[in-house]
Amino acid sequence: QVHLVESGGGLVQAGGSLRLSCTASTSIVRTNAMMGWYRQAPGKQRELVATVSVNSVPNYADSVKGRFTISRDNAKNTVYLQMNGLKPEDTAVYYCNAVHSAGRSWGQGTQVTVSS
């Protein structure tokens, strides 16, 4: 099993930036893990934010294109989400996700709150 630990959430004003990190307990290269970030706002379903393949090809939800950047450091078993130009509608719990050879894993979530 792959355990994921997120960090970097917090409170920021609209227009500000945050960087989220997610570190896996095992090699995300050896497990051929597709890494990603999802988010869930109160009263809403969890939605995809961005994914990055093992060879660093990114994919973004339309709502974050041009503002968010996903990246991974395979040597550190870590994936990042750089969030710029944050909007109040980005407020949510952000979850790290790994789809790997043994299945699918989720982190515990980190709160991001954007004030207007």
Image (spheres, rainbow, N blue to C red):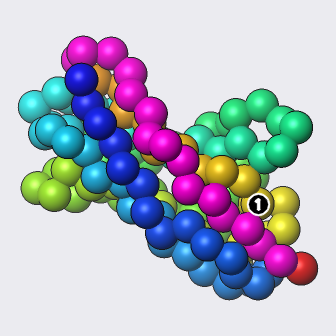
- What span is colored magenta in the figure? 101-115
Position of 25 relative to 79 (above/below): above
Residue displayed at 38% across by 21% down: 104
Q: Find residue 11 and report its horizontal and vertical position in percent.
A: 68, 76
| Quadrant into which the C terminus falls | bottom right
Q: Amino acid at mark 1?
A: Thr
Question: In the rendered image, which quarter is residue 98 located in?
Answer: top left
Q: Which residue is found at the position 66% from the left and 64% from the top?
A: 112
- 16 left or right of 34? right
Using the image, determine if residue 15 lies above or below residue 102: below
Residue 3 colored in magenta in the image: no
Could you tell me which residue is drawn at 78 percent across and 46 percent down? 41
Query: Which image quarter holds the N terminus?
Result: top left
- Looking at the image, residue 104 sits to the left or right of residue 59; the answer is left
Q: Is residue 60 visible?
A: no
Residue 22 appears anywhere in the view: yes
